[in-house]
């Protein structure tokens, strides 16, 4: 199993593009909670959570639970991360070499974070803008 950075990015971009098309989100800005709900992952705020967020499967329904945060960006990232966990198996499958069930938990978290970043800022949509602002996130924002 040898997948390089570019192959991971290509697989992530493909899965993100599919998710955006299914959700009918075709241009920025990306609302991760709306994206999740359009992909049939119901988002609920649960201030009793110890963690920032988690994903629960109840029967056929998938729920993303998020603890409230004054910073909306934090809540959007949590929703995108949890959605990333749901999409990670698809990314692994698209590499053609990685079995999701064999990935250690830390790498699953890292993959979910990468997917979340691509969901919130899809490469095909923002790559030219990122280059123009010299990859300065505050300027890009």
Image (cartoon, rainbow, N blue to C red):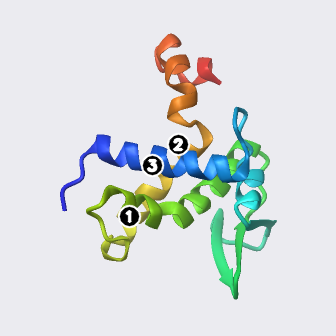
Which of 125 and 107 lies nearest the eye of the viewer?
A: 125
Residue under numbered circle 2: 118
Q: Identify the secondary structure beneath mark 2.
A: helix
**Mark 2 or 1: the one toward you:** 1
Looking at the image, is mark 3 or mark 1 earlier in the sequence? 3
Q: Would residue 58 appear left or right of 14 to someone viewing this image?
A: right
Which of 122 and 134 lies nearest the eye of the viewer?
A: 122
Q: Do the residues under discs 2 and 3 have CB atoms within 8 angstroms?
A: yes
Q: Quadrant of the N terminus?
A: bottom left
Q: Do the residues under discs 3 and 1 have CB atoms within 8 angstroms?
A: no
Q: Identify the secondary structure beneath mark 3.
A: helix
Q: Residue visible at 65% across and 78% down?
A: 56
Q: Residues within 10 Å of mark 2 (few under 14, many from 20)?
A: many
The residues tagged by marks 3 and 1 sit, at their Cα atoms, a distance apart of 11 Å
- Is any atom of residue 116 visible in this view? no
Disc on res. 12: 3
Q: Residue visible at 60% across and 21% down?
A: 140
**Mark 3 or 1: the one toward you:** 1
Which of 139 and 89 lies nearest the eye of the viewer?
A: 89
């Amino acid at each position: 199993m040898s997948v390089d950075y570019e192959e991971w990015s290509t697989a992530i971009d493909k899965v993100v593009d599919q998710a955006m098309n299914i959700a009918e989100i075709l241009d920025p800005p990306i609302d991760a909670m709306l994206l999740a709900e359009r992909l049939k992952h119901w988002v609920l705020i649960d201030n009793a959570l110890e963690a920032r967020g988690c994903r629960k499967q109840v029967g056929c329904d998938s729920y993303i639970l998020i603890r409230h945060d004054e910073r909306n960006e934090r809540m959007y990232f949590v929703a995108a991360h949890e959605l990333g966990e749901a999409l990670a198996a698809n990314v692994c499958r698209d590499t053609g070499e990685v079995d999701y069930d064999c990935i250690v938990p830390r790498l699953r978290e890292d993959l979910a974070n990468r997917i979340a970043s691509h969901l919130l800022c899809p490469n095909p949509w923002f790559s030219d803008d990122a280059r123009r602002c010299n990859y300065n996130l505050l300027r890009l924002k």
